[in-house]
Amino acid sequence: MNGAQALLRTLVDSGVNVCFANPGTSEMHFVAALDDVPEMRGVLALFEGVATGAADGYARMTGQPAATLLHLGPGLGNGLANLHNARRARTPLVNIIGDHAIAHKALDAPLESDIDAVAATVSEWVRRSGNTSTVARDSAEAVAAAISSAGIATLILPADISWSGGAEPAPPVEPAVLARIDHKIVADIAEVLSSAGPKAALLVGSSVLNPHGSQALERVCQATGAKALHETFPTRMTRGGGRFEPDRLAYLTEMAVDQLAGIEHLVLLGSIEPVAFFGYPNKPGRLVPTGCTIHRLAEPNSNAPRALDHLAALVAANLDATPPQPTLLNLPEGPLDPFTVAAAIAATLPEQAIVSDEAATSGIFLFRATKNAPEHDWLSITGGAIGQGMPVATGAAIACPHRPVLNVEADGSAMYTIQSLWTQAREQLNVTTVICDNAAYAVLAMELERVGADSGGPVARSMLDLGKPELDFCRLSEGQGVPAVRVTTAEDLCAELEHAYKEPGPHLIQAILRD
């Protein structure tokens, strides 16, 4: 058995059974070994950013890591933006980077680079395999590290470690156990919430944004009068179906500051202190009001759900959550704009859908509109590096093949990882992509003004214009094997969405939001 075969067998035995790959010469023995380990599903991506984003989407929906396979330093570089997003999402991911054979590295070949240094910028754990006899153990420890840290474990795999014989699979390594809940901290925070009432707020992370967590949060808020907010861009949030939902912390600095105004105690539950997305002239970077005390109930990589249960038991033992109150949503009519697009998506969203949201400014009403849609999972652009939505939808569809996946995508963002469509067609994934086409980097037009730059010049305006030439997403989609339609009205968008959900396989709808 060669090193690649032992590595793959160990990954499968450790619970990793999908590998999103864009391989090169250094990874050919890994590719060949896929036939020897059929339990590992190899998924080909035409760009490394698709592979890394898909691995993120898969892990968000399963809670278990997928593997990536990337080619040397440039391949890692191409996948870096979505590795950044995955790091911010705190999703477990085993990132395998092929490298030159050990003896060849000293020759400074054209593709030689400092893989270790680049990988360290996004990884919680980095190791370079140096011996065929230990490569399987390295891979088992990579899986454990990814799960323990809820982050990226990068294993650098020299080509000769893959092709050399004498390797054997290694047994799985147990991930680290989450730290125990400090009951005194829970009790102290329970007292703070009970005494501060509406002057207290909880800011919660993704690990409690599920039906059980929402019920517990509702009970805590009912009992204490405290306010509940969730992170602006949650990794995964189960919502809809008429359930209680904490308020979303606003993206815009001014609005977030208003939301937190008057809060004297902020409890962090599986979240970190909120800060502005960017620094702006004459605007604060920190969002927490001056004088507000921050209480850390549970760190992001801890047992936040258990901490919340303990808190609810202390302050709301005799309270029940309000039963879900489903709402019938009306089908919108008329020309497409951000409001009617949001209404159409909300009114047609099927039960147990998965929504990958990268709609940017065109999706301004989308999150609020879908609050009372049927129960669904929401996946956000966690790290702000665009080009995430389509790959994440791809990985989510592989993780949950029997659930409909909706990707709501801005036109500018779509062009970063448009190759996702090819993988969706190849794998026949149930992904419906709605391209919100306003022919502009509209979010940057807003930011141009917000940062105080002079926005009146024709060159500046041209740098944000995507209409010259117009992007034909239908042809781009059909050229990759995904059927596509163009719509200009809310009625047509509703009809095409309903058709796409009923018909297996991928679909794309180009929604025109411009005059």
Image (spheres, helix red, strand yellow):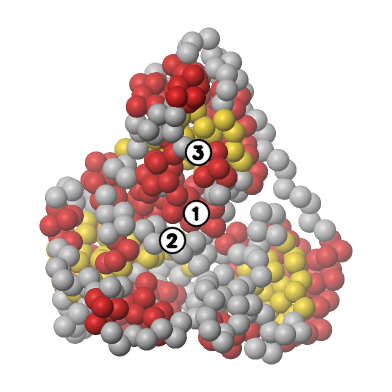
Q: Residues within 10 Å of mark 3 (few under 14, many from 20)?
A: many
Identity of the residue drawn at 14% across and 50% down:
479
Which residue type carries mark 1?
A: His
Quote the CA–CA distance across marks 3 and 2.
Answer: 21 Å
Give the image quarter of residue 435: bottom left
Labels 3 and 1 touching (C-beta < 8 A):
no
Residue at the right extreme?
A: 184
Residue in the picture at 18% in, 55% down = 477
**Callout 2 touching callout 1 (CB < 8 Å):** yes
Amino acid residing under circle 3? Ile
**From the viewer's perspective, is residue 292 above or below residue 108?**
below
Which image quadrant is residue 473 in? Answer: bottom left
Residue 434 spot, x, y in % from top left = 26, 65
Q: Earlier in the sequence, mark 3 or mark 2?
A: 3
Badge 2 is on which residue? 385
Q: Which residue appears farthest toward the front when viewing the image?
A: 107
- The x, y position of residue 399, in whole percent, is 42, 45
Q: Nearer the viewer, residue 125 or 495?
A: 125
Please name the residue that numbered disc 3 is placed on. Answer: 115
* Residue placed under numbered mark 1 in the picture: 84
Please identify the quadrant where the C terminus is shown.
bottom left
Secondary element at image label 1: helix
**Which of the two labelled residues, at mark 2 and mark 1, occupies the earlier sequence position?**
1
Image coordinates for residue 216, horizontal then vertical, percent: 66, 68
Q: Which-is-in-front pick, marks 3 and 2? A: 3
Q: Mark 2 belongs to which amino acid?
A: Ala
Q: Is residue 79 left or right of residue 414?
A: right
Tag 3 and tag 2, C-beta contact below 8 Å:
no
